[in-house]
Each structure stands twice: as structure tokens, then as C-alpha cells.
């Protein structure tokens, strides 16, 4: 298994440009997430999905959009890039909870470094 | 909603010494507490976790303790080695709309000096 794969690894955007961060997982996980990590800071949840066709906002969704047309893919779209979106973005996935168990391991991708200038 | 605080933000230890990272959470309904290690240029990876019905768990040189009454949990690394240098995140998982959500602490940057 490749796990969680994100592309691109690095990208420089100009203010106002748009782009899509791609994310795919081959573990058949129901849950998928997008986090951002600002320098020296923790992980902030942008959007998440509990299954194909279902998405929901996290803590910091403004300026982003997502879709989940398949179990495997969960792309993150930046429509009008702003300097405040300079960050490292992590896609992650997690299996559905087994009966009675209150949590499961989250598997992270390697990250996408985005700079908006 | 749930809030997780993590201390210290930076920790420097000598190789062979122990390192302790502490976290507190706000919502008593949280019932799963994972710890993740993030090496430079990589995504976080789970290193150990503990459920709310357990007070302590150990895996070789790392251990986690949980005090549900005080709502805090800690990561203990013994006999630290240079390869333990990384950023460590604690997290608390709570059930809400959309299933279980995981809230991360701000992270602790651990330096192990050889």
C-alpha cells in the first residue's frame, strides 16, 4: 500500500491564482481530512469527509473547497490564493471505527508546502 | 468544543535522559488520546495511543499516562536518542456530528543532544 499520497510536494502561487492539492489513499478508509500547519504551530482542520459524497467544514474552512466523489480521492481547492494561505498542508485518512472503539489511527500524507506571494 | 493544550513547546534534553511532554484537554467526553511524531519534512505518524479506560500504556522506551479526573495525559520517553528529535503532537478524540473528531495540541519540538 502506498498509504496517503499528496501532490504537489511544493508549489509557489501568486496572489489571486487558483490551484488544487490532490490527495488519494489506497487503504479504503472512510474518513479523510485536510489539515494546515503554520510554522511552529499545530494542525488545524480545514475540511473533512466521512465518506464519498459527504464533506463538512473544520476549524478553518474559509478560502478552501473540497469534494469527495470517490472513496480514494479528496482534493482541496484554493480559489483565490492569499498570503495567509501560505502553509504546509496535510491530507490524512482514517478507517471507520470498529464496533465500540472510540478512535483509530490517522494516517498522514507527506505534506504539500504552499507559498503564496 | 474540545481544546487541547500541550507543554512545553520546546524541550531540549541530553542523550540518555528522559523527556516528558504534558497535555490537558477540556471535554471529559474525549475518550481516545493518540500521540504523533513528526520528523522534519514528513507527515505526523502515530507512535502510541491510549483509551480512556486505561491509565497507562508502555511500548519499549515510550509510555503514556492518562489521568481522567484531572483531564491530562503525558508522554514519557526514556533513554532518549538523537533519532527521537522531532515534533510531538498529542491529541484528543471526541465523538460529535460526523463521527469522531481529533483535536491536536500545538506540538512540542524535542531536541536530543548527543
Image (cartoon, coloured by chain):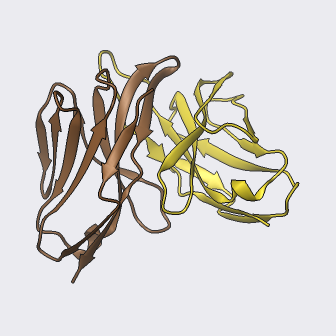
Chain colours: A yellow, B brown
Please tell me which residue is depicted at 12% across the width and 62% down the height of the picture: B78
Q: Is residue B49 left or right of residue B9?
A: left
In the picture shown, does residue B80 fall above or below A33?
Answer: below
In the rendered image, the quadrant that contains the C terminus of chain A is: bottom right
Q: Is residue B44 left or right of residue A10?
A: left
Q: Can residue A79 be seen here?
A: yes
Residue sitting nearer the eye, A28 or A101: A101
* Location of residue A10 (image quadrant): bottom right
Q: Where residue A88 sits in the image (x, y, percent)?
A: 60, 58
| Numbered label tally | 0
Q: Where residue B75 sits in the image (x, y, percent)?
A: 21, 51
Q: Can residue A3 be seen here?
A: no
In the picture shown, does residue B9 fall above or below B26?
Answer: below
* Location of residue A75 (image quadrant): top right
In the picture shown, does residue B5 fall above or below A47?
Answer: below
Please tell me which residue is depicted at 28% across the width and 23% down the height of the picture: B28
* Location of residue B71 (image quadrant): top left
Q: Where residue B14 sits in the image (x, y, percent)?
A: 17, 77
Q: Residue furthest bottom?
A: B114
Please tell me which residue is depicted at 35% across the width and 28% down the height of the picture: A103
Residue sitting nearer the eye, A19 or B108: B108
Q: Where residue A99 sits in the image (x, y, percent)?
A: 32, 15
Residue sitting nearer the eye, A108 or A43: A43
In the picture shown, does residue B114 fall above or below B55?
Answer: below
Amino acid at each position: 500500500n502506498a498509504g496517503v499520497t499528496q501532490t504537489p510536494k511544493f508549489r509557489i502561487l501568486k496572489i489571486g491564482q487558483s490551484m488544487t492539492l490532490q490527495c488519494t489513499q489506497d487503504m479504503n478508509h472512510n474518513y479523510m481530512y485536510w489539515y494546515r500547519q503554520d510554522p511552529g504551530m499545530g494542525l488545524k482542520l480545514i475540511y473533512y469527509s466521512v465518506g464519498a459524497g459527504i464533506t463538512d467544514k473544520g476549524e478553518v474552512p474559509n478560502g478552501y473547497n473540497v469534494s469527495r466523489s470517490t472513496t480514494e480521492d479528496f482534493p482541496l481547492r484554493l480559489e483565490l490564493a492569499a498570503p495567509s494561505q501560505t502553509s504546509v498542508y496535510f491530507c490524512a485518512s482514517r478507517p471507520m471505527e470498529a464496533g465500540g472503539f472510540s478512535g483509530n489511527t490517522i494516517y498522514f500524507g507527506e505534506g504539500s508546502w504552499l507559498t503564496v506571494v | 468544543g474540545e481544546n487541547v493544550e500541550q507543554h512545553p513547546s520546546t524541550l531540549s534534553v541530553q542523550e540518555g535522559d528522559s523527556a516528558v511532554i504534558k497535555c490537558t484537554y477540556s471535554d471529559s467526553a474525549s475518550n481516545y488520546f493518540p500521540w504523533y511524531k513528526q520528523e522534519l519534512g514528513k507527515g505526523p505518524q502515530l507512535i502510541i495511543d491510549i483509551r480512556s479506560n486505561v491509565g497507562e500504556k508502555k511500548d519499549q522506551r515510550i509510555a503514556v499516562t492518562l489521568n481522567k479526573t484531572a483531564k491530562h495525559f503525558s508522554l514519557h520517553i526514556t533513554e532518549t536518542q538523537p533519532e527521537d528529535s522531532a515534533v510531538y503532537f498529542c491529541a484528543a478524540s471526541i465523538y460529535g456530528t460526523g463521527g469522531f473528531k481529533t483535536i491536536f495540541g500545538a506540538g512540542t519540538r524535542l531536541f536530543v543532544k548527543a
